[in-house]
Image: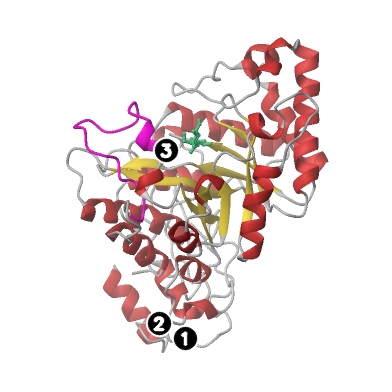
Amino acid sequence: MRNLAKLLIWVAGISPLGFACAPSPAVGGGGAGAGGSGAAAGTLGGIASGGRAVGGAPAGGAGASTSGGEAGSPAGSGGVAAVAGTGNGGASAGSGNGGGGGASGGTGGATACAGATTLKDAGSCTNRLIGVALTNRHLDEPEFAAAALQFNYVTPEDEMKWDVTEPQQGTFTFAEGDAIVEFAEANGMKVKGHTLVWHNQLPSWLDALNEAQLRAALKAHIEGVMAHYAGRVIAWDVVNEAFDDDGSLRSSIWSQKLGQSFIEDAFRFARAADPNVKLYYNDYDIESAYAKADSVYEMVKDFKQRGVPIDGVGMQMHTRTTDEDPPVPELIVNLDRLLALGVEVVLSEMDVRYCADGTDEKQKKRFHDIVAACVARSGCGAITIWGITDRYSFLNDRTDLQCAGSLPPRPLLWNDDYQKKPSFDGVMDALLGR
Ligand code: 9MR
Protein backbone atom coordinates (compact mmCIF):
# COMPACT_ATOMS: atom_id res chain seq x y z
CA MET A 1 0.00 0.00 0.00
CA ARG A 2 2.73 2.41 0.93
CA ASN A 3 4.65 1.62 -2.25
CA LEU A 4 1.57 2.19 -4.32
CA ALA A 5 1.11 5.56 -2.70
CA LYS A 6 4.67 6.47 -3.51
CA LEU A 7 4.13 5.41 -7.08
CA LEU A 8 1.05 7.58 -7.42
CA ILE A 9 2.87 10.55 -5.97
CA TRP A 10 5.70 9.95 -8.39
CA VAL A 11 3.34 9.66 -11.32
CA ALA A 12 1.81 12.97 -10.30
CA GLY A 13 5.23 14.53 -10.60
CA ILE A 14 5.67 15.19 -6.93
CA SER A 15 8.75 14.33 -4.99
CA PRO A 16 8.07 11.31 -2.83
CA LEU A 17 9.87 13.20 -0.10
CA GLY A 18 7.33 15.87 -0.50
CA PHE A 19 8.54 18.37 2.04
CA ALA A 20 10.27 20.81 -0.21
CA CYS A 21 6.98 21.67 -1.74
CA ALA A 22 6.30 25.23 -2.64
CA PRO A 23 2.89 26.59 -1.80
CA SER A 24 0.76 24.86 -4.31
CA PRO A 25 -2.87 24.92 -5.20
CA ALA A 26 -4.91 21.96 -4.25
CA VAL A 27 -4.92 19.45 -6.97
CA GLY A 28 -6.84 17.13 -4.72
CA GLY A 29 -9.90 18.82 -6.01
CA GLY A 30 -13.24 17.67 -4.92
CA GLY A 31 -12.17 14.52 -3.27
CA ALA A 32 -15.47 12.99 -3.97
CA GLY A 33 -14.92 10.45 -1.26
CA ALA A 34 -17.37 8.14 -2.82
CA GLY A 35 -16.88 5.74 -0.02
CA GLY A 36 -18.68 3.25 -2.12
CA SER A 37 -20.41 0.44 -0.49
CA GLY A 38 -18.71 0.67 2.84
CA ALA A 39 -21.01 -0.78 5.37
CA ALA A 40 -19.65 0.94 8.39
CA ALA A 41 -22.00 3.84 8.67
CA GLY A 42 -24.69 3.05 11.13
CA THR A 43 -23.79 -0.58 11.34
CA LEU A 44 -23.80 -0.95 15.04
CA GLY A 45 -23.11 -4.62 15.00
CA GLY A 46 -20.35 -4.16 12.50
CA ILE A 47 -17.72 -2.91 14.83
CA ALA A 48 -16.38 -6.12 16.13
CA SER A 49 -16.16 -7.64 12.71
CA GLY A 50 -14.29 -4.80 11.08
CA GLY A 51 -10.68 -4.85 10.26
CA ARG A 52 -10.17 -6.41 6.89
CA ALA A 53 -8.32 -4.07 4.62
CA VAL A 54 -9.82 -4.01 1.23
CA GLY A 55 -10.28 -0.95 -0.88
CA GLY A 56 -8.51 1.83 0.90
CA ALA A 57 -6.76 2.87 -2.26
CA PRO A 58 -4.24 5.64 -1.78
CA ALA A 59 -6.29 8.06 -3.73
CA GLY A 60 -5.99 10.99 -1.42
CA GLY A 61 -4.05 13.48 -3.46
CA ALA A 62 -5.75 12.80 -6.68
CA GLY A 63 -9.16 13.05 -5.16
CA ALA A 64 -10.01 9.98 -7.13
CA SER A 65 -11.52 7.89 -4.49
CA THR A 66 -12.18 4.36 -5.45
CA SER A 67 -14.92 2.11 -4.48
CA GLY A 68 -14.38 2.43 -0.80
CA GLY A 69 -13.70 -0.28 1.64
CA GLU A 70 -15.51 -2.67 3.77
CA ALA A 71 -16.38 -1.82 7.27
CA GLY A 72 -13.32 -1.31 9.28
CA SER A 73 -10.83 -1.08 6.51
CA PRO A 74 -7.93 1.24 7.00
CA ALA A 75 -8.24 4.42 5.10
CA GLY A 76 -5.61 3.88 2.54
CA SER A 77 -2.79 6.34 2.35
CA GLY A 78 -4.65 9.48 1.52
CA GLY A 79 -2.63 11.49 3.93
CA VAL A 80 0.58 10.69 2.14
CA ALA A 81 -0.37 12.51 -0.97
CA ALA A 82 -1.85 15.35 1.03
CA VAL A 83 1.50 15.96 2.64
CA ALA A 84 3.00 16.44 -0.75
CA GLY A 85 1.04 19.64 -1.06
CA THR A 86 -1.78 18.35 -3.12
CA GLY A 87 -4.63 18.91 -0.75
CA ASN A 88 -6.32 16.21 1.19
CA GLY A 89 -9.21 15.60 -1.10
CA GLY A 90 -10.44 12.11 -0.97
CA ALA A 91 -8.51 11.46 2.16
CA SER A 92 -11.21 9.15 3.32
CA ALA A 93 -11.07 7.03 0.25
CA GLY A 94 -11.65 3.47 1.14
CA SER A 95 -12.63 4.20 4.67
CA GLY A 96 -15.91 2.48 4.15
CA ASN A 97 -18.07 5.22 5.49
CA GLY A 98 -20.67 4.88 2.83
CA GLY A 99 -20.05 8.20 1.18
CA GLY A 100 -19.50 10.41 4.16
CA GLY A 101 -15.81 10.82 3.72
CA GLY A 102 -13.63 13.08 1.69
CA ALA A 103 -16.35 15.60 1.01
CA SER A 104 -14.25 18.56 1.90
CA GLY A 105 -11.43 17.75 -0.45
CA GLY A 106 -8.99 20.16 -1.95
CA THR A 107 -7.89 21.84 1.19
CA GLY A 108 -5.21 23.85 -0.49
CA GLY A 109 -1.48 23.99 -0.68
CA ALA A 110 0.43 22.74 2.26
CA THR A 111 2.83 25.58 2.77
CA ALA A 112 3.77 24.45 6.23
CA CYS A 113 4.94 21.10 4.88
CA ALA A 114 8.17 22.54 3.65
CA GLY A 115 10.60 21.26 6.22
CA ALA A 116 7.96 20.82 8.91
CA THR A 117 9.76 20.21 12.18
CA THR A 118 7.02 20.99 14.67
CA LEU A 119 3.90 19.00 15.28
CA LYS A 120 1.76 22.03 14.54
CA ASP A 121 3.36 22.59 11.14
CA ALA A 122 3.05 18.92 10.32
CA GLY A 123 -0.61 19.06 11.30
CA SER A 124 -1.14 22.08 9.10
CA CYS A 125 -0.15 19.96 6.13
CA THR A 126 -3.59 18.42 6.26
CA ASN A 127 -5.42 21.36 7.84
CA ARG A 128 -5.49 19.79 11.26
CA LEU A 129 -5.02 21.45 14.62
CA ILE A 130 -2.53 19.75 16.92
CA GLY A 131 -3.45 20.33 20.49
CA VAL A 132 -2.22 19.84 24.00
CA ALA A 133 -3.75 20.02 27.44
CA LEU A 134 -2.05 22.76 29.42
CA THR A 135 -2.27 23.70 33.05
CA ASN A 136 -1.18 26.85 34.83
CA ARG A 137 0.56 24.70 37.39
CA HIS A 138 3.56 24.35 35.08
CA LEU A 139 3.38 27.20 32.61
CA ASP A 140 6.20 29.02 34.36
CA GLU A 141 8.62 26.16 33.68
CA PRO A 142 10.70 27.10 30.63
CA GLU A 143 10.88 23.55 29.29
CA PHE A 144 7.14 23.10 29.68
CA ALA A 145 6.36 26.36 27.90
CA ALA A 146 8.91 25.63 25.17
CA ALA A 147 7.47 22.21 24.47
CA ALA A 148 3.99 23.74 24.32
CA LEU A 149 5.09 25.66 21.23
CA GLN A 150 4.99 22.42 19.29
CA PHE A 151 1.21 22.79 19.35
CA ASN A 152 -1.31 25.26 17.96
CA TYR A 153 -4.38 24.27 19.97
CA VAL A 154 -4.85 24.27 23.74
CA THR A 155 -7.30 22.61 26.08
CA PRO A 156 -7.09 23.88 29.68
CA GLU A 157 -6.62 20.76 31.76
CA ASP A 158 -8.64 21.97 34.76
CA GLU A 159 -8.90 25.75 34.62
CA MET A 160 -12.31 26.08 32.97
CA LYS A 161 -14.13 23.43 34.95
CA TRP A 162 -17.18 24.37 37.00
CA ASP A 163 -15.52 24.29 40.44
CA VAL A 164 -12.99 26.81 39.17
CA THR A 165 -15.23 29.07 37.10
CA GLU A 166 -18.31 29.27 39.35
CA PRO A 167 -17.28 28.21 42.85
CA GLN A 168 -20.25 30.07 44.37
CA GLN A 169 -23.53 30.38 42.58
CA GLY A 170 -23.46 33.42 40.34
CA THR A 171 -19.87 34.29 41.22
CA PHE A 172 -17.63 33.62 38.27
CA THR A 173 -13.85 33.45 38.51
CA PHE A 174 -11.95 33.40 35.29
CA ALA A 175 -8.39 34.25 36.28
CA GLU A 176 -7.11 30.69 35.90
CA GLY A 177 -8.72 30.10 32.56
CA ASP A 178 -7.70 33.54 31.37
CA ALA A 179 -4.06 32.76 32.06
CA ILE A 180 -4.21 29.77 29.74
CA VAL A 181 -6.01 31.78 27.06
CA GLU A 182 -3.44 34.56 27.33
CA PHE A 183 -0.60 32.08 26.94
CA ALA A 184 -2.33 30.61 23.91
CA GLU A 185 -2.99 33.98 22.30
CA ALA A 186 0.58 35.13 22.90
CA ASN A 187 1.80 32.04 21.08
CA GLY A 188 -0.64 31.86 18.19
CA MET A 189 -2.57 28.93 19.60
CA LYS A 190 -6.30 28.40 19.44
CA VAL A 191 -8.27 27.29 22.48
CA LYS A 192 -10.98 24.72 23.14
CA GLY A 193 -13.00 25.35 26.28
CA HIS A 194 -13.24 22.35 28.59
CA THR A 195 -15.75 21.59 29.98
CA LEU A 196 -19.19 23.09 30.64
CA VAL A 197 -21.07 20.10 32.06
CA TRP A 198 -19.44 17.14 33.79
CA HIS A 199 -20.08 15.00 36.85
CA ASN A 200 -16.63 15.76 38.28
CA GLN A 201 -15.05 18.90 39.69
CA LEU A 202 -18.39 20.42 40.59
CA PRO A 203 -18.95 22.93 43.40
CA SER A 204 -20.98 21.61 46.33
CA TRP A 205 -23.60 24.35 46.11
CA LEU A 206 -25.18 22.48 43.22
CA ASP A 207 -26.21 19.66 45.58
CA ALA A 208 -28.86 21.74 47.30
CA LEU A 209 -30.76 22.66 44.13
CA ASN A 210 -34.04 21.11 43.06
CA GLU A 211 -34.81 20.17 39.47
CA ALA A 212 -35.94 23.59 38.28
CA GLN A 213 -33.15 25.35 40.11
CA LEU A 214 -30.55 22.97 38.74
CA ARG A 215 -31.72 23.47 35.16
CA ALA A 216 -31.60 27.24 35.68
CA ALA A 217 -28.12 26.95 37.17
CA LEU A 218 -26.99 24.89 34.18
CA LYS A 219 -28.24 27.58 31.82
CA ALA A 220 -26.72 30.41 33.82
CA HIS A 221 -23.38 28.64 34.05
CA ILE A 222 -23.19 27.97 30.33
CA GLU A 223 -24.22 31.56 29.56
CA GLY A 224 -21.81 33.09 32.03
CA VAL A 225 -18.76 31.09 31.02
CA MET A 226 -19.40 31.21 27.30
CA ALA A 227 -20.04 34.94 27.33
CA HIS A 228 -16.71 35.51 29.04
CA TYR A 229 -14.77 33.47 26.51
CA ALA A 230 -16.74 34.46 23.41
CA GLY A 231 -14.34 35.22 20.59
CA ARG A 232 -11.40 33.71 22.46
CA VAL A 233 -12.19 30.02 22.15
CA ILE A 234 -13.12 28.24 18.95
CA ALA A 235 -14.92 25.29 20.51
CA TRP A 236 -16.37 23.95 23.74
CA ASP A 237 -16.66 20.51 25.23
CA VAL A 238 -20.26 21.15 26.19
CA VAL A 239 -20.99 17.85 27.87
CA ASN A 240 -18.31 15.49 29.11
CA GLU A 241 -18.66 11.76 29.90
CA ALA A 242 -22.42 11.52 30.26
CA PHE A 243 -22.58 7.78 29.61
CA ASP A 244 -21.48 4.80 31.61
CA ASP A 245 -19.40 1.95 30.28
CA ASP A 246 -22.47 -0.20 29.70
CA GLY A 247 -23.99 2.48 27.49
CA SER A 248 -26.56 3.63 29.99
CA LEU A 249 -26.78 7.18 31.19
CA ARG A 250 -24.17 7.79 33.88
CA SER A 251 -25.59 8.37 37.31
CA SER A 252 -24.78 11.94 38.27
CA ILE A 253 -26.44 14.97 39.72
CA TRP A 254 -27.46 15.83 36.18
CA SER A 255 -29.06 12.54 35.24
CA GLN A 256 -30.62 12.04 38.68
CA LYS A 257 -32.34 15.39 38.81
CA LEU A 258 -32.82 16.26 35.14
CA GLY A 259 -32.79 12.95 33.28
CA GLN A 260 -31.09 12.54 29.90
CA SER A 261 -32.55 15.83 28.69
CA PHE A 262 -29.74 17.68 30.45
CA ILE A 263 -27.45 16.82 27.55
CA GLU A 264 -29.75 18.26 24.95
CA ASP A 265 -30.54 21.28 27.09
CA ALA A 266 -26.85 22.01 27.53
CA PHE A 267 -26.26 22.00 23.79
CA ARG A 268 -29.24 24.28 23.17
CA PHE A 269 -28.16 26.68 25.92
CA ALA A 270 -24.65 26.69 24.49
CA ARG A 271 -25.74 27.44 20.95
CA ALA A 272 -27.91 30.29 22.18
CA ALA A 273 -25.04 31.64 24.26
CA ASP A 274 -22.55 31.70 21.40
CA PRO A 275 -23.50 30.88 17.82
CA ASN A 276 -19.89 31.10 16.64
CA VAL A 277 -18.13 28.25 18.43
CA LYS A 278 -18.11 24.56 17.73
CA LEU A 279 -19.99 22.46 20.25
CA TYR A 280 -18.66 19.02 21.12
CA TYR A 281 -19.72 16.02 23.10
CA ASN A 282 -16.60 14.49 24.70
CA ASP A 283 -16.11 11.01 26.17
CA TYR A 284 -13.72 8.08 26.67
CA ASP A 285 -14.14 4.48 25.58
CA ILE A 286 -16.18 5.54 22.59
CA GLU A 287 -13.37 4.61 20.23
CA SER A 288 -14.07 0.91 19.89
CA ALA A 289 -16.76 -1.71 20.17
CA TYR A 290 -18.11 -0.58 23.50
CA ALA A 291 -21.76 -0.17 24.29
CA LYS A 292 -20.93 3.40 25.20
CA ALA A 293 -19.77 4.07 21.66
CA ASP A 294 -23.13 2.91 20.38
CA SER A 295 -24.98 5.13 22.84
CA VAL A 296 -23.03 8.19 21.78
CA TYR A 297 -23.52 7.35 18.13
CA GLU A 298 -27.28 7.01 18.65
CA MET A 299 -27.42 10.26 20.60
CA VAL A 300 -25.58 12.19 17.90
CA LYS A 301 -27.75 10.66 15.20
CA ASP A 302 -30.86 11.64 17.14
CA PHE A 303 -29.51 15.16 17.71
CA LYS A 304 -28.80 15.60 14.01
CA GLN A 305 -32.26 14.33 13.09
CA ARG A 306 -34.01 16.63 15.53
CA GLY A 307 -31.82 19.66 15.01
CA VAL A 308 -30.21 19.70 18.43
CA PRO A 309 -27.07 21.76 17.85
CA ILE A 310 -23.92 19.66 17.91
CA ASP A 311 -20.82 20.11 15.77
CA GLY A 312 -18.54 17.34 16.85
CA VAL A 313 -17.54 14.47 19.05
CA GLY A 314 -14.33 14.23 21.02
CA MET A 315 -12.92 10.75 21.34
CA GLN A 316 -10.66 11.15 24.35
CA MET A 317 -8.29 8.37 23.32
CA HIS A 318 -6.72 7.51 26.64
CA THR A 319 -5.16 4.32 25.42
CA ARG A 320 -2.25 1.96 26.07
CA THR A 321 0.62 0.13 24.50
CA THR A 322 -1.24 -3.09 23.92
CA ASP A 323 -3.19 -3.12 20.72
CA GLU A 324 -6.41 -4.19 22.32
CA ASP A 325 -8.14 -1.03 23.24
CA PRO A 326 -9.11 0.33 20.85
CA PRO A 327 -8.01 -1.83 17.98
CA VAL A 328 -7.37 0.55 15.11
CA PRO A 329 -9.92 -1.13 12.80
CA GLU A 330 -12.60 -0.62 15.44
CA LEU A 331 -11.55 2.97 15.86
CA ILE A 332 -11.93 3.45 12.13
CA VAL A 333 -15.44 2.05 12.14
CA ASN A 334 -16.42 4.39 14.94
CA LEU A 335 -14.74 7.38 13.36
CA ASP A 336 -16.42 6.78 10.05
CA ARG A 337 -19.90 6.16 11.31
CA LEU A 338 -19.77 9.40 13.32
CA LEU A 339 -18.36 11.34 10.37
CA ALA A 340 -21.14 9.95 8.22
CA LEU A 341 -23.61 11.70 10.53
CA GLY A 342 -22.12 15.00 9.44
CA VAL A 343 -20.26 15.90 12.61
CA GLU A 344 -16.57 16.54 13.09
CA VAL A 345 -14.57 14.09 15.17
CA VAL A 346 -11.51 15.09 17.16
CA LEU A 347 -9.08 13.03 19.20
CA SER A 348 -9.37 15.12 22.31
CA GLU A 349 -7.24 13.73 25.15
CA MET A 350 -4.79 11.28 23.67
CA ASP A 351 -2.17 9.45 25.67
CA VAL A 352 -0.74 5.92 25.46
CA ARG A 353 0.20 4.40 28.78
CA TYR A 354 2.67 1.56 29.22
CA CYS A 355 1.39 -1.91 29.87
CA ALA A 356 3.22 -5.07 30.82
CA ASP A 357 4.56 -5.59 27.33
CA GLY A 358 5.15 -1.90 26.77
CA THR A 359 8.20 -0.57 25.00
CA ASP A 360 9.04 2.79 23.54
CA GLU A 361 8.64 1.32 20.09
CA LYS A 362 5.20 -0.08 20.85
CA GLN A 363 4.16 3.25 22.23
CA LYS A 364 5.48 5.01 19.14
CA LYS A 365 3.55 2.65 16.88
CA ARG A 366 0.34 3.06 18.86
CA PHE A 367 0.56 6.84 18.63
CA HIS A 368 1.41 6.58 14.95
CA ASP A 369 -1.36 4.23 13.95
CA ILE A 370 -4.08 6.08 15.82
CA VAL A 371 -3.00 9.50 14.60
CA ALA A 372 -2.74 8.13 11.06
CA ALA A 373 -6.36 6.98 11.21
CA CYS A 374 -7.36 10.55 12.01
CA VAL A 375 -5.05 12.10 9.43
CA ALA A 376 -6.60 9.98 6.70
CA ARG A 377 -9.98 11.62 7.31
CA SER A 378 -10.62 15.25 6.55
CA GLY A 379 -13.44 15.30 9.09
CA CYS A 380 -11.08 14.40 11.93
CA GLY A 381 -10.06 17.97 12.51
CA ALA A 382 -7.86 18.03 15.58
CA ILE A 383 -5.62 15.80 17.64
CA THR A 384 -4.95 16.81 21.23
CA ILE A 385 -2.40 15.13 23.47
CA TRP A 386 -3.34 15.13 27.18
CA GLY A 387 -0.25 16.79 28.55
CA ILE A 388 3.37 17.43 27.68
CA THR A 389 5.73 15.54 29.95
CA ASP A 390 5.32 12.13 31.54
CA ARG A 391 6.27 13.78 34.79
CA TYR A 392 2.95 15.57 35.04
CA SER A 393 0.54 13.15 33.40
CA PHE A 394 -2.71 12.84 35.34
CA LEU A 395 -2.15 9.08 35.13
CA ASN A 396 0.67 9.27 37.67
CA ASP A 397 -2.01 9.79 40.32
CA ARG A 398 -4.53 7.35 38.89
CA THR A 399 -3.39 3.90 39.94
CA ASP A 400 -6.84 2.64 38.99
CA LEU A 401 -6.12 3.46 35.36
CA GLN A 402 -2.54 2.27 35.17
CA CYS A 403 -1.68 -1.03 33.60
CA ALA A 404 -0.82 -4.03 35.71
CA GLY A 405 2.81 -4.64 36.53
CA SER A 406 3.67 -1.47 38.42
CA LEU A 407 5.16 0.16 35.36
CA PRO A 408 5.04 3.93 35.44
CA PRO A 409 2.47 5.00 32.86
CA ARG A 410 4.84 7.27 30.84
CA PRO A 411 2.02 8.04 28.43
CA LEU A 412 3.16 11.21 26.64
CA LEU A 413 5.61 12.58 24.05
CA TRP A 414 8.30 13.96 26.39
CA ASN A 415 9.91 12.04 29.23
CA ASP A 416 10.29 13.28 32.80
CA ASP A 417 13.31 15.34 31.76
CA TYR A 418 11.67 16.93 28.74
CA GLN A 419 13.50 14.75 26.24
CA LYS A 420 11.43 13.92 23.19
CA LYS A 421 10.51 10.26 23.10
CA PRO A 422 10.05 7.93 20.14
CA SER A 423 6.33 8.58 20.60
CA PHE A 424 6.95 12.16 19.43
CA ASP A 425 8.36 10.79 16.17
CA GLY A 426 5.42 8.45 15.87
CA VAL A 427 2.99 11.37 15.91
CA MET A 428 5.18 13.41 13.57
CA ASP A 429 5.50 10.56 11.10
CA ALA A 430 1.76 10.01 11.03
CA LEU A 431 1.06 13.71 10.51
CA LEU A 432 3.47 13.74 7.58
CA GLY A 433 2.04 10.58 6.06
CA ARG A 434 5.09 8.49 6.73
O1 9MR B 1 -6.09 15.96 33.75
C1 9MR B 1 -7.11 16.31 34.66
C2 9MR B 1 -6.58 16.22 36.07
O2 9MR B 1 -5.64 17.24 36.30
C3 9MR B 1 -7.72 16.31 37.06
O3 9MR B 1 -7.22 16.03 38.36
C4 9MR B 1 -8.80 15.33 36.71
C5 9MR B 1 -9.95 15.43 37.67
O4 9MR B 1 -10.93 14.49 37.39
O5 9MR B 1 -9.26 15.57 35.39
C6 9MR B 1 -8.26 15.35 34.46
O6 9MR B 1 -8.75 15.54 33.15
C7 9MR B 1 -9.83 14.71 32.74
C8 9MR B 1 -10.62 15.47 31.71
O7 9MR B 1 -11.02 16.71 32.23
C9 9MR B 1 -11.81 14.69 31.22
N1 9MR B 1 -11.43 13.39 30.75
C10 9MR B 1 -10.60 12.61 31.64
C11 9MR B 1 -9.37 13.42 32.06
C12 9MR B 1 -8.46 12.57 32.88
O8 9MR B 1 -9.09 12.21 34.09
Horizontal side of 289 relative to 316 (left or right) equals: left
Asked if the residue under mark 1 is in contact with the one under mark 2, i.e. CB atoms within 8 Å, the reply is: yes
- The answer to whether residue 376 shows anywhere in this view is no
Of the numbered discs 2 and 3, the one sitting upstream in the chain is 2
Closer to the camera: disc 2 or disc 3? 3
**Residue that carries the numbered disc 3 in the rendered image:** 394
Q: Quadrant of the C terminus?
A: bottom left
> Where 353 falls versus 89 (above or below)?
above
Determine if the magenta segment contains residue 411: yes
Q: Position of residue 65 (x, y in %)?
A: 47, 67
Q: Amino acid at mark 3?
A: Phe
For the point 75% across and 26% down, the residue is 218
Per the rendered image, the range of residues in magenta is 394-414
**Rendering quarter of residue 80:** bottom left
- The answer to whether residue 153 shows anywhere in this view is yes
- Mark pair 3, 1: CA separation: 39 Å
Give the camera-side residue of 261 and 403.
403
| Numbered marks: total | 3
Q: Position of residue 130 (x, y in %)?
A: 51, 59
- Element type at marker 2? loop
